[in-house]
Image (spheres, grey):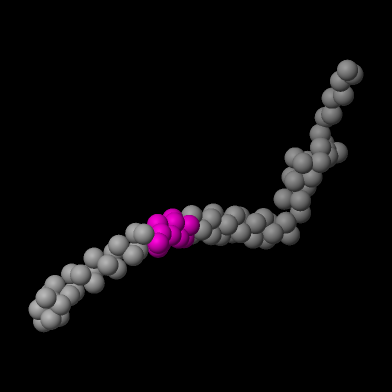
Amino acid sequence: MLHRLLHAPLKVFLLCCLFGGGSLLLNGGLLRLYSLDRDETELQNQIQHLQTELQDLDANIKRAKDPTFIARQAMDHLDMVTDRDLVFVFAE
């Protein structure tokens, strides 16, 4: 019977596919492959997000050379005012 099987290449191929597929399912290789693919997609999304953030930071660095940008940042983040601003002080 084994002799007959070896002379039928299609049956040998199907048998190899069956054992190969069963091996992938039983040892977790297929699940691991799916997990790695999902991780790759997540990492690609993170890379895209970080590249966008990097472009924004580069634009801020270029704008930081402008004195009006520096003044605006100081007013917004450090509560500084200019000579022309009217400041109200409220007692608590």
Compared to residue 12, the image places residue 88 above or below, namely above
Q: Is residue 42 visible?
A: yes
Q: Of 40 and 80, which appears nearest the observer?
A: 40
Query: Where are the magenta residues, as a range?
Result: 27-41
- Image quadrant in which the C terminus is located: top right
Chief secondary structure of the magenta span? helix
Q: Position of residue 30 (x, y in %)?
A: 37, 60
- Image quadrant in which the N terminus is located: bottom left
Q: Position of residue 23 (x, y in %)?
A: 33, 65
Q: Of 79 and 38, which appears nearest the observer?
A: 38
Compared to residue 84, the image places residue 5 above or below, namely below
Q: Residue furthest right?
A: 91
Compared to residue 10, the image places residue 56 above or below, namely above
In this rendering, position of residue 38 left or right of residue 65: left
The residue that appears at 23% across and 69% down in the rendered structure is 17
Q: Position of residue 67 (x, y in %)?
A: 76, 54
Q: Of 28 and 1, which appears nearest the observer?
A: 1
Q: Position of residue 68 (x, y in %)?
A: 74, 50
The residue that appears at 75% across and 46% down in the rendered structure is 73
